[in-house]
Image (cartoon, helix red, strand yellow):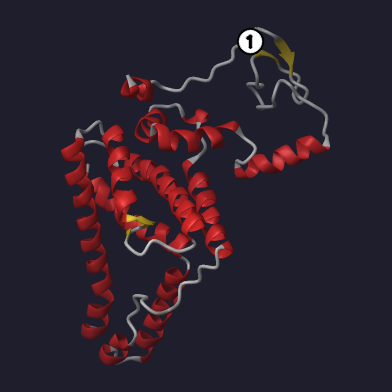
């Protein structure tokens, strides 16, 4: 019964036969929006309330799709993403904007709770390039790489997005025959948004980052893995064990790709 309710596509259609004349272009039409210029049928004169609503709509905080998207990201995440892929996008908040907002929220919560990661423990190349680099340009180039890596370490909300690129490629390879790369990329934007929300709640409640988190997500391992399995079981319609081993394989493949890419600069400096 629960699974049937989660699979049911969310519908939001309010039909009307009322005739309207567009205040902008003069087109006669039936519906909520002008088919020529897109102006809302229920046009209102500019008021302070409209200005505030318009500002909130830019970020999604004043729109119903934002609240609906957050709710369904935890109630029926995989089915919601499948609905979006099958054309129900107007019902939900755009994934790129969703990830941007949740990342900003994570960064704001971390700042409020006073979390400032130190340089200790950051992955940087350091003396490796000074040891193998024989030219000044190589040393200068990879010093900049170190600076970028250090900045990402000190800003975990954005390092999540950077590491997420590897995770998207890994998940596409693991679920190769089930979705195209663009569909996997679209799906992972929503899943990353979900994880950013969980990470922000974790930081807000505990006041600290999850030390045993699952890269690229800043959430505890014991929460992140079950949540990802929950997402993928709905998204790819898989049973428990196929979902678990594919999720674990995705992380193993992601880490292997990160190690491979991380080793390329050393080979470049050493042999060029």
According to the picture, the residue beneath numbered tag 1 turns out to be 16
| Rendered image quadrant of residue 33 | top right
Residue shown at 55% from the left, 37% from the top: 66
Helix, strand or loop for disc 1: loop
Total number of numbered discs in the rendering: 1
Residue sitting at the far top: 17
**Who is closer to the viewer here, 195 or 169?**
195
Residue at image coords 65%, 37%: 62
Task: Give me the residue at 25% from left, 89% from top.
Answer: 132
- Residue shown at 71%/37% (left/top)? 53
The image shows residue 261 at horizontal and vertical percentages of 26, 68
In-image side of 219 versus 259 (left or right): right
* Disc 1 packing (10 Å; few <14; some 14–19; many ≥20): few
Outermost front residue: 206
90 w.r.t. 208: above or below = above
In front here: 138 or 7? 7
Residue 124 falls in which quadrant of the image?
A: bottom left
| Quadrant location, the N terminus | top left
Residue 84 x/y as whole percent? 42, 31
Direction from residue 181 to residue 110 in the image, left or right = right
Q: Is residue 251 left or right of residue 165?
A: left
Above or below — where is 24 with respect to 162? Answer: above
Q: Quadrant of residue 139?
A: bottom left
> Can you say whether 35 is above or below 112 in the image?
above
- At which x and y percent is residue 129? 30, 86
């Amino acid at each position: 019964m629960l699974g049937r309710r989660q699979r049911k596509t969310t519908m939001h259609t309010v039909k009307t036969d009322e005739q309207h004349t567009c205040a902008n272009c003069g087109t006669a039409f039936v519906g909520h929006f002008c088919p020529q210029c897109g102006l809302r049928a229920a046009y209102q004169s500019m008021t302070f309330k409209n200005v505030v609503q318009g500002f909130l709509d830019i970020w999604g905080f004043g729109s119903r799709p934002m609240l609906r998207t957050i709710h369904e990201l935890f109630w029926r995440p995989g089915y919601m993403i499948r609905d979006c892929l099958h054309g129900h996008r107007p019902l939900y908040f755009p994934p790129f904007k969703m990830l941007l907002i949740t990342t900003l929220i994570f960064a704001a919560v971390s700042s409020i709770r006073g979390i400032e990661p130190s340089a200790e423990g950051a992955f940087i190349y350091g003396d490796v390039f000074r040891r193998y680099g024989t030219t000044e340009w190589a040393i200068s180039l990879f010093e900049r790489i170190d600076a970028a890596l250090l900045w990402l370490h000190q800003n975990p909300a954005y390092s999540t997005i950077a590491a997420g690129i590897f995770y998207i490629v890994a998940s596409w390879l693991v679920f190769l025959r089930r979705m195209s790369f663009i569909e996997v990329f679209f799906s992972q934007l929503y899943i990353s948004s979900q994880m950013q929300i969980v990470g922000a709640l974790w930081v807000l409640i505990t006041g600290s980052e999850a030390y045993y988190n699952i890269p690229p997500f800043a959430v505890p391992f014991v929460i992140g893995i079950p949540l990802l399995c929950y997402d993928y079981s709905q998204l790819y319609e898989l049973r428990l064990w196929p979902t678990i081993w594919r999720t674990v394989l995705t992380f193993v493949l992601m880490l292997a790709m990160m190690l491979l890419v991380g080793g390329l600069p050393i080979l470049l400096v050493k042999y060029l």
